[in-house]
Image (spheres, rainbow, N blue to C red):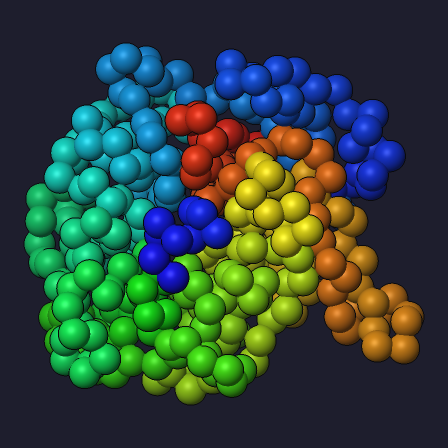
Amino acid sequence: MQRKDFIKTTSFGLLGAMLTPLHRSPYGQYLAKNEVILGHNNKRYKINTRWSQADVARYPVNNCHEMVQDKKGRILLLTDETRNNVLIYDKNGKILDSWGKEYPGAHGLTLFNENGEDVLFICDNTRHQVIKTTIDGRVLMTLDYPKETGVYAKAEEYVPTETAIAPNGDIYVADGYGKDYVIQYNHKGEYIRHFGGKGDTAAHLSNAHGVCVDMRDKANPCLMVTSRVQNAFKKYDLEGKYLETIDLKGAWVCRPVIKGDYLYAAVLQSNSRQWAQSGFVTILDKNNKVVSNLAGSTPLQRSPDGQYSGAQVEEMYQTIKAFQYPHDVLIDDEENMYVAQWNSGKTYPIKLEPVV
């Protein structure tokens, strides 16, 4: 799915949502006030909508796509605003630095510690490339469209949205707005294989928006790949063999982000209210069961016989307008969460602090 076509086309239940205090943003949208508690079970957070201290005139943003934390503890935000593609924050929201004017389609941002040094992988939708850089933006490698696969006739068919890096340095690129393949390279950028793609079987993908290496089961590392239109993550082994589908009914999930035993994901929108600023954040445990939805419905789990036993997830949806179109989450070294948003009035990221 091309991006232009894609654009066209909690401890609170419903009662809690109606009673939640709201305030009007500068863009006229009603959002949950600061200090409101979002989420369920042991994953509850206090929202801070005023975290970013960036001067909008000096450090503007357009779409805030993704965030990572480097080994110095700094927060890096990727935006497709070419006056400053990367904003570097401290954890209190103060801008420390910025760089980048050459990434008009900046979308995916992945950090990898390579021999003790942080490096970044940027997916650019407009350039149809993946660019590896140092932490301060010096280009180290550029991956063009993967003609070696034999499935791409021209660069425009390839619209990469995310990368994941395996411990051995292998690079996995998700072509989330192109043909939905995951392309695997070695650490030198040499093509190994491709898998996924559009189709009708369980192994195929629909809007392969994100990918990550899941090391929670260290004996069986795997890839977790987004199939957003299908409201699911799909698991593959590191050679691209399909393993299983994690069904997340109603949730247009973005990239999977793993910290500790948990998988976190921004949900762009609720399936029941498409293109109506109906996003939330979902959290899965080590068994890939939903344990919390921030600004979303209570994560009930119903089995085929109607009993709530954890076998099948009920359809999820937004219950509180705390977010518009969440696009990515970051969990920092103190377990704080940051949420970057797409198409949300050029708003800066929101910080959420865990409630013990």
**Left or right placement of residue 74 versus residue 52 in this view:** left
Where is residue 327? Give x, y as percent: 46, 44
- Residue 119 in view (yes/no): no
The count of marks equals: 0
**Left or right placement of residue 105 versus residue 20 in this view:** left
Q: Quadrant of the N terminus?
A: bottom left
Residue visible at 45% across and 80% down in the picture: 199
Residue visible at 19% across and 26% down in the picture: 83
Where is residue 249? Give x, y as percent: 67, 62
Where is residue 266? Give x, y as percent: 53, 48
Where is residue 324? Give x, y as percent: 55, 35
**Left or right placement of residue 132 versus residue 327 in this view:** left
Pick the residue in front: 57 or 188: 57
**Left or right placement of residue 87 versus residue 300 in this view:** left
Where residue 17 sits, quadrant-wise, is top right
Residue visible at 51% across and 61% down in the picture: 228
Where residue 213 sits, quadrant-wise, is bottom left
Residue 246 drawn above or below residue 284: below
Residue visible at 84% across and 77% down in the picture: 304
Q: Quadrant of the C terminus?
A: top right
- Residue 70 in view (yes/no): yes
Pick the residue in front: 143 or 98: 143
